[in-house]
C-alpha cells in the first residue's frame, strides 16, 4: 500500500509538467492516490492488470468529476495528471525489449497488453464522463 | 465590423485551448458558447491542427475565421483560464474590447520555469519507478537520468522540432544513461530505471484525448490524436530498442 504514497508524489510531479496551478496539485494528487489504491485492491482480487486499470481509471474519472464540481474547474485538470502513472510505459518497454531479444511471441503478448491497457484507461474515463453527464448535467447551460 | 470582433475572440479562445491540450469537444463548445452569447448562429470545425469557425448574423451575412495550430503542448492552467474567461464572457462580465486584451494576456502567460518542470518530471518518474516495483537503490539513478534527459529535451523543445524526433532522441539519451549507470554498479535494475525514465515521455494525454474524441463523435480528431500517440510510442520504443540492440552488439564482440 506504500504505492499510494508514491502515486501521490508521482502525480504532483506530472502535474508540474502539465502546468497545473499550484493550489490544485494536492487535489489531483489525492485522486491519483485513491486511483492507485483502487488499482492495488483490484489487482489483489482479480490478478488482471486490465481489470485493475479500468477500475482505477473509473475511480480517477469519478473523483475528477466530483472535484470539478467542488473547485468549479474543468475535470480534465484533475484527470490528466492522475491517469498518467497508469499509462503502460512498462509494457511499451517490455515489448521493445522482447523484440530486441528476438522473442516475437512475448513481444506480441506485451504489445497487445499495452494496447488493451490504453483502451482500458480511455474506456474507464469515458464511461464516467458519459454517465455523469447523463445523470447530473441537466442544470448546465 | 462587430461581427469580426466576436469572431476574433471566439477564434483566439479556441486557438489557446487547442494549443494547450484541451480536447476537441471542449474547443468547439467554448467557441460556440461565446458566439451564441453574442447572438450568432455558429458552425465550428476543429481538428488537432485547424480551427474553422463560420458565423451567420441576423441579416444572414456570413463570416469565417480559420486558425492553424502547428505546435501543441499541455498547459492545464491556460485551459482553465480560458474556461473561466468564456464563462464570464457569456454572462456579459467582459465586453468585446476587453476580451481580446484578456485573451492576449492569457496567451502570453509563462509556464513554470524549466527547472521546476524538469524536477517535476524527475519526481513523477522516480515515483512511478517505485510503483512498478523498483527499489530505493534505483531512485537516484532514475532521478539523474530523467533530469539530464528532460533538461536536454526542454532546451531542444524551444526550437520547435517535431515531437517524433524529440521523443526518439530523448529515449536514446535515457537508455544510454541508464545503461552506463547500471554498468558502473550504480542502481540495481536496468529495466526499472528505463521504465521509470520513459514515463514523462509516454503519450498518455494523447491516448486519452484521442479516445475521448472518438466517443464524442469527433472522428477526424480522434484518428489524428491516436495516430500521434502511436507515433510517439513507436519513437520511444525505437529509441530504447535501438540503443539496447547496439549495446548488446558491442558487448557481444
Image (spheres, rainbow, N blue to C red):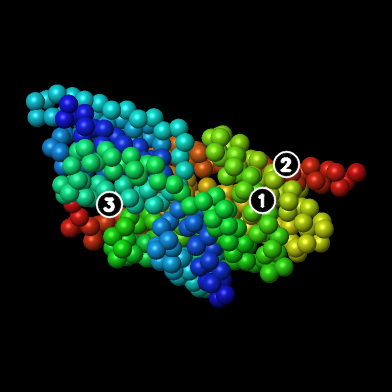
In the rendered view, would you say A46 is above or below B119? Answer: below
**Residue A90 occupies quadrant:** bottom right
Query: Residue B221 versus residue B175: which sits nearer the camera?
Result: B175
The subunit carrying tag 2 is B
Residue B243 relative to residue A140: left or right = right
Secondary structure at badge 1 equals helix
Q: Is residue A4 visible?
A: yes
| Depicted A78 relative to depicted B59: above or below | below
Q: Chain of mark 1?
A: B
Q: Is residue B136 left or right of residue B161?
A: right
Name the spot of residue B110 as percent of width and height, x first: 44, 47
Q: How many marks?
A: 3
Q: Residue B242, which numbered label?
A: 2
Left or right of residue B163, residue A100 in this image: right
Quadrant hosting residue B138? bottom right
Does dot 2 land on a helix, a strand or a loop?
Answer: helix
Q: Residue furthest right?
A: B253
- How far separated are the C-alphas under marks 3 and 1? 37 Å
Give the residue pinned by disc 3.
B84
Q: Are marks 2 and 1 in contact (CB under 8 Å)?
A: no
Residue A126 location (% of width, % of height): 37, 54
Q: Dot 2: within a 10 Å radius of its alpha carbon, few (fewer than 14), some, or many (20 or more) residues?
A: some
Q: Which residue is mark 1?
A: B148
Amino acid at each position: 500500500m506504500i504505492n499510494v504514497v508514491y502515486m501521490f508524489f508521482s502525480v504532483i510531479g506530472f502535474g508540474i509538467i502539465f502546468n497545473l496551478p499550484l493550489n490544485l496539485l494536492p487535489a489531483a494528487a489525492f485522486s491519483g492516490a485513491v486511483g492507485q489504491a483502487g488499482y492495488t485492491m483490484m489487482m489483489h482480487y482479480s490478478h488482471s492488470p486490465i481489470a485493475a486499470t479500468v477500475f482505477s481509471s473509473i475511480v480517477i474519472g469519478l473523483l475528477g468529476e466530483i472535484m470539478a464540481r467542488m473547485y468549479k474547474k474543468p475535470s480534465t485538470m484533475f484527470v490528466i495528471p492522475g491517469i498518467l502513472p497508469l499509462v503502460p510505459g512498462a509494457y511499451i518497454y517490455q515489448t521493445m525489449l522482447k523484440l530486441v531479444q528476438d522473442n516475437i511471441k512475448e513481444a506480441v503478448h506485451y504489445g497487445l497488453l499495452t494496447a488493451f491497457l490504453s483502451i482500458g484507461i480511455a474506456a474507464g474515463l469515458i464511461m464516467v464522463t458519459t454517465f455523469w453527464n447523463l445523470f447530473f448535467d441537466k442544470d448546465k447551460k | 465590423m462587430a461581427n469580426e470582433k466576436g469572431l476574433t475572440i471566439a477564434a483566439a479562445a479556441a486557438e489557446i485551448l487547442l494549443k494547450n491540450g484541451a480536447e476537441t469537444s471542449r474547443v468547439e463548445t467554448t467557441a460556440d458558447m461565446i458566439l451564441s452569447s453574442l447572438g450568432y448562429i455558429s458552425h465550428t470545425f476543429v481538428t488537432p491542427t485547424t480551427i474553422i469557425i463560420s458565423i451567420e448574423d441576423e441579416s444572414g451575412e456570413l463570416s469565417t475565421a480559420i486558425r492553424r495550430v502547428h505546435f501543441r503542448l499541455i498547459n492545464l492552467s491556460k485551459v482553465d483560464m480560458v474556461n473561466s474567461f468564456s464563462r464570464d464572457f457569456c454572462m456579459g462580465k467582459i465586453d468585446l474590447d476587453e476580451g481580446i486584451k484578456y485573451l492576449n494576456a492569457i496567451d502570453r502567460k509563462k509556464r513554470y520555469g524549466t527547472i521546476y518542470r524538469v524536477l517535476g518530471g524527475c519526481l513523477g518518474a522516480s515515483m512511478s519507478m517505485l510503483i512498478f516495483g523498483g527499489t530505493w537503490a534505483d531512485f537516484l539513478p532514475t532521478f539523474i537520468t530523467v533530469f539530464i534527459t528532460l533538461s536536454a529535451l526542454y532546451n531542444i523543445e524551444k526550437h520547435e522540432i517535431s515531437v517524433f524526433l524529440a521523443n526518439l532522441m530523448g529515449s536514446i539519451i535515457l537508455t544510454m544513461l541508464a545503461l552506463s549507470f547500471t554498468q558502473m554498479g550504480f542502481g540495481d535494475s536496468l529495466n526499472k530505471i528505463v521504465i521509470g525514465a520513459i514515463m514523462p515521455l509516454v503519450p498518455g494525454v494523447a491516448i486519452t484525448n484521442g479516445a475521448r474524441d472518438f466517443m464524442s463523435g469527433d472522428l477526424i480528431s480522434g484518428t489524428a490524436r491516436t495516430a500521434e500517440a502511436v507515433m510517439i510510442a513507436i519513437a520511444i520504443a525505437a529509441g530504447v530498442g535501438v540503443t539496447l540492440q547496439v549495446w548488446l552488439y558491442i558487448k557481444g564482440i
